[in-house]
Amino acid sequence: MKISVIGAGAWGTAAAIAFARSPAHRVTLWARDAGLCAAMQAARENERYLSGNAFPATLNICADFATALGGADLLLIATPLAGLRPTLRQLRASGATTPFLWLCKGLEADSGMLPHQVAAEEMAGLAVAHGALTGPSFAEEVARALPTAVTLASADAAFARAMTQELSGPRLRIYANDDVVGAEVGGAVKNVLAIASGISDGLGLGHNARAALITRGLAEVVRFGLALGARRETLMGLAGMGDLILTCTGDLSRNRRVGLALAAGRPLADIVRELGHVAEGVPTAREVARRATALGVEMPIVQTVCAVIDGRLPAAAAVDRLMARDPKDE
């Protein structure tokens, strides 16, 4: 299969490396930045976003969008969520009808849309198979061929199963799912909860507090997902609970690192700038909180994270706000 990965950040690069290892695939990695492409060609690795992970000899690097699309059987859109809509517009303008999967997670800023809603809006009227590739998957570990299992979700169940068969490999196990809403909600909200987990760990609140945050955070994911039409079993699977556990506990989590820095009293603007990568939990927190309020869904942890990142509540006061809530049945 000829695969073109659109976006050469950490996750796009990791996906390109992983699939290029298979003799069954011919992979092209596209980057908008011609300078980045030249640097990757010279070093045969992405020193900017995923240093120390050598490219397979067969991995092609490309800075021309039309060339990247040419002859591709599948596109993997690996831009941050903010780049999904402009990428889809560029794809539509090209006239290509290549099936595509997006790797981004979150709710779009201002619109509050999930990625599949953005895709439906931008690709309206076109019969192009598409879906989400999501789940517990740190880019660094995927690039190093450490065992990983993820979810491929599409409303087209046959497409999801076919792509699962094509893309699964010895170190990357993929499960097909037709619950796109559930897969996307799990991937979005877990980033917000990872910020909460980082704050808790940064304040030295202990393992009990972290376990409580993850467990009660999962309850918030489920309430929000069900309100949007997700299936409970999806939220309890890889794309939900699996991704939540990884992101809330793993040191490679960008969003958890944001929480750790907030707990240390660092200004959010400085944290985001120095991170060097997109931390989707920051803009997603505001959109999840807004949509939850409109839906009448109670999400106290998400609301507290919003208060901290917006500067309305010191990180050290967040635990008191949550613990002081009225007792409830579990």
Image (spheres, helix red, strand yellow):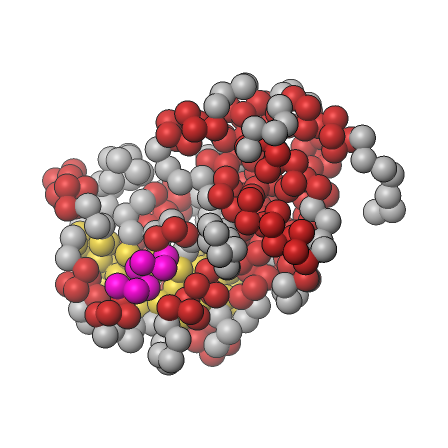
| 330 is within the stretch colored magenta | no
Main structural element of the magenta stretch: helix, strand or loop? helix
The structure residue drawn at horizontal position 72% and vertical position 55%, both measured from the top left corner, is 296
In this picture, residue 93 sits left or right of residue 145: left
The structure residue drawn at horizontal position 74% and vertical position 30%, both measured from the top left corner, is 321
Magenta region: 84-90
Which of 215/272 is in front? 272
In this picture, residue 180 sits left or right of residue 212: left
In this picture, residue 145 sits left or right of residue 54: right
Q: Position of residue 24 (x, y in %)?
A: 28, 65
The structure residue drawn at horizontal position 54% and vertical position 19%, both measured from the top left corner, is 265
Q: Position of residue 277 (x, y in %)?
A: 37, 37
Identify the image quadrant of the N terminus. Answer: bottom left
Q: Position of residue 244 (x, y in %)?
A: 59, 45
**Visible residue check, residue 59:** no
**Visible residue check, residue 277:** yes
Which of 312/76 is in front? 312
The structure residue drawn at horizontal position 57% and vertical position 23%, both measured from the top left corner, is 263
